[in-house]
C-alpha cells in the first residue's frame, strides 16, 4: 500500500504544522484523549509549576531573556495565541500548530508539545519516538484570547481517523523515515525505514 507522505499532505492543506506533530498525535491519540478526559473531570487540578499566559513572572523565561526566547512552555503558549493556519481534527476537536497539539476543555487549555526527533539522544526506543509533553493552563485570561473563542482566521480541517487507517510516512532523522502502521481508530504503531 502506498503511504500518505505527510509533507505533501501538510503542503496541500496549507497549514503551519510540522509533520512530527501529526505523527506524534497518531502514535499517541489514545493517551492524549485519556489526558483530555482526566482534565475534564471536575476534580482535576493543575500540577505545579502552574503556568499562566503572562510570562513576566516566569523565572525560566527570565533565565532565557538574554537569548531572546521564552521558556519551552511559554513558547508553546505564545505560538498558540498568535498562530494562524491551524489544522483542526474533526474527530477529536483538537487543534494543531507547529509543534503543538491543543484543545480547550471547559476553561482550561491543554497543550501537547511534540519534541522534534533531532532532540533524541542515545539509542532509539519506542518511548523516545512517541515522547510528548503535556501542559494544562488554567488561567481566567484565556477567555479573552483567540484560543478561548477559537477565532483563528484560517482553520483547515482533517480527520485523524482517516489517517489512522492509512500508512503515513515522514522524515524522522538523517538516518530514518517513520511510517505509521494502522492498528485501530485510536492508535498507530510505527516502523523506521532507512533513508538510503
Image (tube, grey):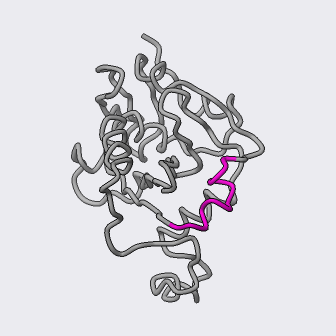
Q: How many marks?
A: 0
Q: Where is residue 181, by image quadrant?
A: top left
Seen from the viewer's position, the closer of residues 47 and 21 is: 47
Q: Where is residue 27, by image quadrant?
A: top left
Horizontal arrangement in the rendering, residue 118 relative to residue 107 (left or right): left
Measuring 48% from the left and 18% from the top, which residue is drawn there?
A: 162
User: Is the C terminus in the top left, top right, bottom left or bottom right quadrant?
Assistant: top left
Horizontal arrangement in the rendering, residue 192 relative to residue 116 (left or right): left
Where does the image place residue 152, in percent across and percent down from the top left? 72, 46
Where does the image place residue 28, in percent across and percent down from the top left? 34, 39
Overall secondary structure of the magenta stretch?
helix
Above or below 140: residue 90 = above
Magenta-drawn segment: 139-150
Seen from the viewer's position, the closer of residues 80 and 165 is: 80
Measuring 61% from the left and 67% from the top, which residue is drawn there?
A: 141
Measuring 38% from the left and 45% from the top, which residue is drawn there?
A: 36
Q: Where is residue 167, by image quadrant?
A: top left
Measuring 46% from the left and 87% from the top, which residue is drawn there?
A: 59
Where does the image place residue 134, in percent across and percent down from the top left? 38, 56
Where does the image place residue 195, in percent across and percent down from the top left? 41, 35
Above or below 132: residue 7 = above
Q: Residue furthest right?
A: 153
Does the stretch in magenta take in 52? no
Seen from the viewer's position, the closer of residues 25 and 105 is: 105
Horizontal arrangement in the rendering, residue 72 relative to residue 48 (left or right): right
Amino acid at each position: 500500500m502506498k503511504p500518505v507522505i505527510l509533507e505533501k499532505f501538510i503542503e496541500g492543506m496549507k497549514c503551519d504544522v510540522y509533520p512530527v506533530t501529526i505523527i506524534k498525535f497518531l502514535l499517541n491519540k489514545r493517551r492524549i484523549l485519556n489526558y483530555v478526559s482526566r482534565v475534564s473531570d471536575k476534580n482535576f487540578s493543575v500540577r505545579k509549576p502552574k503556568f499562566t499566559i503572562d510570562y513576566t513572572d516566569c523565572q525560566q523565561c527570565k533565565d532565557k531573556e538574554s537569548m531572546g526566547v521564552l521558556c519551552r512552555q511559554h513558547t508553546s503558549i505564545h505560538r498558540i495565541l498568535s498562530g494562524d493556519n491551524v489544522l483542526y481534527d474533526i474527530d477529536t476537536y483538537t487543534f494543531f500548530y507547529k509543534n503543538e497539539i491543543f484543545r480547550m476543555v471547559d476553561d482550561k487549555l491543554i497543550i501537547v508539545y511534540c519534541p522534534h526527533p533531532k532532540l533524541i539522544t542515545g539509542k532509539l526506543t519506542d518511548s523516545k519516538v512517541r515522547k510528548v509533553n503535556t501542559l494544562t493552563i488554567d488561567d481566567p485570561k484565556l477567555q479573552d484570547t483567540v484560543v478561548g473563542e477559537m477565532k483563528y482566521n484560517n482553520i483547515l480541517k482533517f480527520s485523524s481517523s482517516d489517517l489512522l487507517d492509512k500508512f503515513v510516512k515522514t522524515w524522522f532523522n538523517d538516518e530514518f523515515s517513520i511510517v505509521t502502521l494502522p492498528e485501530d481508530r485510536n492508535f498507530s504503531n510505527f516502523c523506521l525505514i532507512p533513508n538510503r
